[in-house]
Image (cartoon, rainbow, N blue to C red):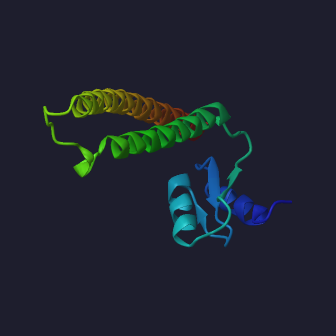
Amino acid sequence: MKKHEKLARQILKDHPEQGEVHITEDGQPFFSGIKARNYAGKNRHDKKPTIFFSSGNEPEDNSDLEAAIEKLKSRNATLEATLEATSNAADLGEDVPELNTESAAEVVAVVELREKIAEAEKHSGQMEEALKSSQEAQKNAEKELKDLQAANAKSKSKK
């Protein structure tokens, strides 16, 4: 028997209109998963709240969406780190030599430096576009997950 299962059964018996109850590791029950997670986070609980379902209500398997969201978060972190590294590399500060036409080597160095700056700016723009695209995909996946959870909760409440 899971920890807090007896409490969950009693709560679901007392509130048959609820299809599920979320109980934090300290035994605090919630009908809202978001409120339970917020409470657990605020109180620095090590575990996520446990979800108990009334009979006939089964948890929906959203593991594929959750995995996709985690993958997008990881990709976003990588893109943000790459973008920051690119920006740092393009920030040449005072390392830009003054153009002095007396030396051909200086002219070549300035031209090469300008080409590198242009390439870094181009790469930075591409990274920003990729990051925005990835963030948009993450938002869409999170919205889809919320919509599925809301539909699931709505169908449970009709039962």
| Residue for point 62% across, 46% down | 19
In the image, taking residue 95 as reference, residue 65 lies left or right, namely: right
Compared with 120, 30 (above or below) is: below
Choose between 48 and 95: the one closer to the eye. 95
Q: Quadrant of residue 108?
A: top left
Q: Position of residue 46 (x, y in %)?
A: 67, 66
Q: Quadrant of residue 126?
A: top left
Choose between 51 and 120: the one closer to the eye. 120
In the image, taking residue 44 as reference, residue 135 lies left or right, namely: left
| Residue for point 55% across, 37% down | 69
In the image, taking residue 34 as reference, residue 113 lies left or right, namely: left
| Residue for point 50% across, 59% down | 35
State how many labels appear.
0
Compared with 72, 51 (above or below) is: below
Q: Position of residue 134 (x, y in %)?
A: 44, 31
The quadrant of the rendering that contains the C terminus is top right
Q: Quadrant of residue 82?
A: top left
Q: Position of residue 111 (x, y in %)?
A: 24, 27
Quick one: which residue is furthest to the right in this view? 1
Choose between 124 and 2: the one closer to the eye. 124
Choose between 78 and 148: the one closer to the eye. 78
The quadrant of the rendering that contains the N terminus is bottom right
Q: Position of residue 34 (x, y in %)?
A: 51, 54
